Image (cartoon, rainbow, N blue to C red):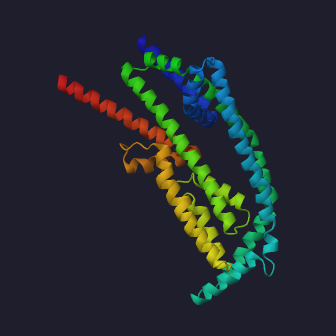
Amino acid sequence: QARALDVLALVALAALIRLAFPVGVGLVLGALLGFTLQPLYERLRARGWGAGTAALSCTLGAMAIVSSGALGLGALFVTRGVALLGSLPTQLAPGGAVNELAKSLERYSARLHVDSSALSSRLEQEALSLGSRAAQLAGAVAGTAFSGLLTVFFMTLTAYSVMRHWTHLVRRLELTLPLELRHTHALLNQFRRVGREVLLGTLVTGILQGLLASLGYWVTGVPQPGVFGALTAVASLVPAVGTLLVWIPLGVYRIVTGHVAAGLISLIYSALVVGVATDYFIRPRLLGADKNVPVLLTFVSLFGGVEVFGLVGLVLGPVIVTLSIAILRTYQAEVSALRKAA
């Protein structure tokens, strides 16, 4: 009978996971958002706020900020991005930036004894193709609105539930999981701490990099600095290369189109401020990286997380790896204790 109950419990758990999988992104992000808002929730509770009122206020305030940011980013891409793509045919005209870029490529390739006619023709074709597909790109962005709203809905419910019922959930898991109470409590606290740090370290650093990049692009005369700043913030989520995907092509583009000083200043500023300062000084402080996690596993968590879960894997991957290491260390300590007792 006990084994039958165990099997039924596993089946029930598997069924719940399978049903939750389509909205898993919202659930995971909502849980991490709840962990992040927990200190604010506890401050409000200490000031006499009711549990439900404090949790609801924190959740609605955070989701208002998230929704406003997402809508602003989408509007920026749709309006300014489409305008940028639509201007490409004009830029291909004599004297236009793309036309000048093609001529610069021809000059540099001639010095290297490379036939540039095919490269130049390909560049013009791709530019015109992007311009003609501007409306389609805008439609594709708008088409993701429903999925985004569904994610926001589950993020809101999950964040509220985590803040409101976390203590009750911990007690239930301590009684249900086949672990000692101290181990269950330690693992759940680890999950909450790591989730909070990873979310803050990833999102806040990306936003800061986007703002700093926009400032640099504006000063050095890059067209549509807000659009490229937003792209830089999004690119910061890509492991290893990150913001390099945006500011290096922009800097090289400025140089080959004749703006050598502006291009060099853009590259130097982006490398030192957007790259080194944020990635090596600001991000580690926000992330609170666990020094006990090997560097190899850090890269596994980033690249493996993206491969398995998509972009949300940049947050979920490090959390899973950190918890897995904590579980393995707990298991190792228990096995060592049993061997010594024997």
- Height in image: 225 above or below 257? above
**Figure quadrant of residue 1:** top left
* Number of marks drawn: 0
x then y, percent, for residue 303? 49, 51
Residue in the picture at 44% in, 51% down: 299
Q: Quick check: 304 left or right of 130?
A: left
The answer to whether 293 appears left or right of 12 in the picture is left
x and y, in percent, of residue 206 in the image = 59, 50
Residue at (75%, 39%) from the top-left corner? 146
Q: Residue at x 72, y 49 (%)?
A: 73
Occupied quadrant, residue 128: bottom right
Query: Residue placed farthest to the front in the image?
Result: 47
Q: Is residue 263 shown above or below 274?
A: below
Residue 143, position as x, y percentages in the image: 77, 46
> Quadrant of the image for the C terminus?
top left
Residue at 41% over, 24% down: 184
Residue 15 visible in the snapshot: no
Given residues 167 and 220, the one toward you in this image is 220
298 with respect to 92 (left or right): left
* Residue 160, position as x, y percentages in the image: 63, 26
Quarter-of-image position of residue 60: top right
> Is residue 329 visible from the viewing direction of this image?
yes
Furthest toward the top, the residue is: 1
Of residues 256 and 18, the one drawn nearer to the viewer in this rendering: 256
